[in-house]
Image (cartoon, rainbow, N blue to C red):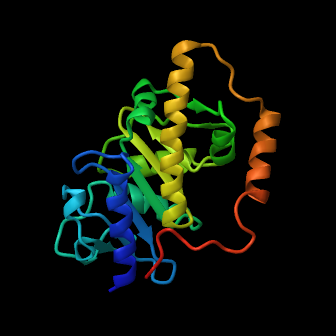
Amino acid sequence: MLEDLKKLVCKANKSLKELNLVKWTSGNVSYRDPESNKVIIKPSGVHFDELKPEDMVVVDLDGNIIEGHLKPSVDTASHLYVYRNRDDIHSVVHTHSPFATSFAIRGKDIPSYTTTAANMFKDYVPCSDFAAIGEEEIGKQIVDLIGTSPAVLLRNHGVFTVGTDVEQALKAAVILEETAEYAHYATLHEPDIMPLSKDIIAQCNHFYKTSYGQTEKKTKLFNKG
């Protein structure tokens, strides 16, 4: 079932380690198939290097296992809450990337200090309240805070990013860690540095959405083949 999508999700999960966004077995990527509404997600506690497409777990939106020989991620309920409440979201990425998580530990939003941050996250990346792992509460925090930014910091835990597809959600996770690293070093030297103004942020975001990239639809980094 959904064999091509299992390959897609497996490859995306393995890329989390390659991109230095996770360590050991923590973190996950899921994808909701728009045709069947089935969700493919990483199994719990399996090393990224050992993941195979056949290890991916297929669940329905209520969390029932449709296919898979392993237990799904402990974050499955959170992912499913997002999918049930946001029809436009088809991929969720969860990481513990170090610089972004350092902001989450402190309960701090990340303002847009760079034009790249403005392009991707507009005004800022919000930090949620504390929520218990393995429950729907994390999903509720994501849904409540996801707006113009495709990323949320989960207080004392890590990062969640979303997208209309796997590549979009993964890109947000990568750019968020870059944004957090730059913000960390900049505020370390100048704690009161001001973020970009709302006017500049709006200009950057509009330009990025209307002008960046190729006119024709680009080939996806993670395709279905």
Which percent across, then down, holds residue 3? 34, 83
Q: Quadrant of the C terminus?
A: bottom left
Q: Can residue 149 be seen from the camera position used here?
A: yes
User: Which residue reaches farthest bottom?
Assistant: 1
User: Which residue reaches farthest left?
Assistant: 69
Q: Is residue 46 left or right of residue 61?
A: left
The image shows residue 134, relative to residue 105, as above or below, that is: below
Which percent across, then down, holds residue 151? 53, 46
Q: Is residue 176 left or right of residue 149?
A: left
The one nearer the camera, 50 or 73, is 50
Name the residue rendered at 63%, 40% in the picture: 117
The image shows residue 163, relative to residue 157, as above or below, that is: below
The one nearer the camera, 166 or 17, is 17
Which percent across, then down, holds residue 177? 48, 40
Splitting the image into 4 quarters, where does residue 6 fall?
bottom left
Which percent across, then down, holds residue 189? 54, 13
Q: Quadrant of the N terminus?
A: bottom left
- Number of callouts in the render? 0
Q: Can residue 62 be seen from the camera position used here?
A: no
Q: Is residue 161 left or right of residue 195?
A: left
Name the residue rendered at 22%, 76% in the picture: 68
The one nearer the camera, 165 or 190, is 190
